Image (spheres, grey):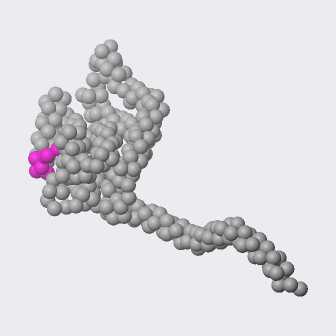
Amino acid sequence: MDLSQLALPLLAVISVGGVLYAVLDPILAGNSAAAKRKAALETRSPSVVVARGNDAAKRRKQVTDSLKELDARARSKKISFESKMAQAGLSWSKQRFIIGSIVLGIGAGVAGYILNGSPLIAVGLAIIAGFGLPRWFVNNRRKSRIKKFLEEFPSAIDIIVRGIKAGIPLGDCLRNIAGEAAEPVRAEFRHIMEAQQMGLSIPEAVERIVDRVPTPEASFFSIVISIQAKAGGNLAEALNNLSNVLRDRKKMRGKIKAMSSEAKASAGIIGALPFVVAFFVYLTSPAYIMLLFTTTTGNTVLGVCAFWMGCGIFIMKKMINFDM
């Protein structure tokens, strides 16, 4: 066979093979590269998932540890007289409070003895005015101040969130609240800035707000600042979520107050009924009702009735008050 006859089919086969190689090689190479990328992702994704899971677990552990630390500190720490005065927004010293209580008790006892002439009633008024009335005033002032703080606190956090999103440092945001917010939020943030000027870091200064305002909301704020300082993260987003939680808690308190208003009205009517009846009996038959105030037996009856009346009011108060 002639070589020229063999060369023609050989060249045709080589040409067809070259065309097929040129067409199929990119496809095969692309499939191989895709397979390699898929294998790399499959080998890498478990480690990425594990790393993200470890970060989330680490953050949850830090939050849990902070909550346990704050709870243990709150349980082990007794509220001192100075702390109660600070929480009530008062600057009284312990000596001034004791002297004022003694003077108030003596004055009430002397006035009761002059008006009634009964030593038993005079001693009772002295104890109530000297021991109970000042403490009731401080506790009532403390609750009222904390309530006002919770009303203004979400707005203060919103100011911090907007400032951080605008690129303002956290310290400047706290300084703005200390100068422009409503009381008592302004006073509490002013204490934070004073502590920072004394050399404390921002998380350490913010932790002090829990001692002056012992509420879960203040604890949440302190935990968010502390966790962000330790682990980093988006502080604006965390504080924005905290603000939403605080507003939801505020709405829930309003719903609870509305639902328990009927029970509170009933308790108020029941508690005031004996005094109203005694007043009308005094208007119609003063000699009949005055036996309770002018005789020893009547005074004893009044004392026993006041004790059981106090127990009933205390029980009704516990039944209609709900804590969040």
Q: The N terminus appears in which quarter of the rendering?
A: bottom right
The residue at 38%/58% (across/down) is: 233
Determine whether, in the image, residue 44 is placed left or right of residue 317: right
Determine whether, in the image, residue 278 is placed left or right of residue 318: left
Tally of numbered tags: 0
**Where 154 sits versus 73, above or below?**
above
Can residue 120 be seen here?
no
Between 203 and 159, the residue placed more toward the observer is 159
Horizontal and vertical percent position of residue 171: 22, 52
Q: Quadrant of residue 299?
A: top left
Horizontal and vertical percent position of residue 185: 25, 43
**Where 132 sits versus 285, above or below?**
below
Q: The C terminus appears in which quarter of the rendering?
A: top left
Of all residues, the one furthest to the right in this rendering is 1
Q: Quadrant of residue 273?
A: top left
Q: Quadrant of residue 277?
A: top left
The residue at 58%/72% (across/down) is: 40
The answer to whether residue 197 is magenta is no
The residue at 36%/27% (across/down) is: 272
Between 38 and 93, the residue placed more toward the observer is 38
Q: What span is colored magenta in the figure?
A: 86-96
Horizontal and vertical percent position of residue 178: 20, 45
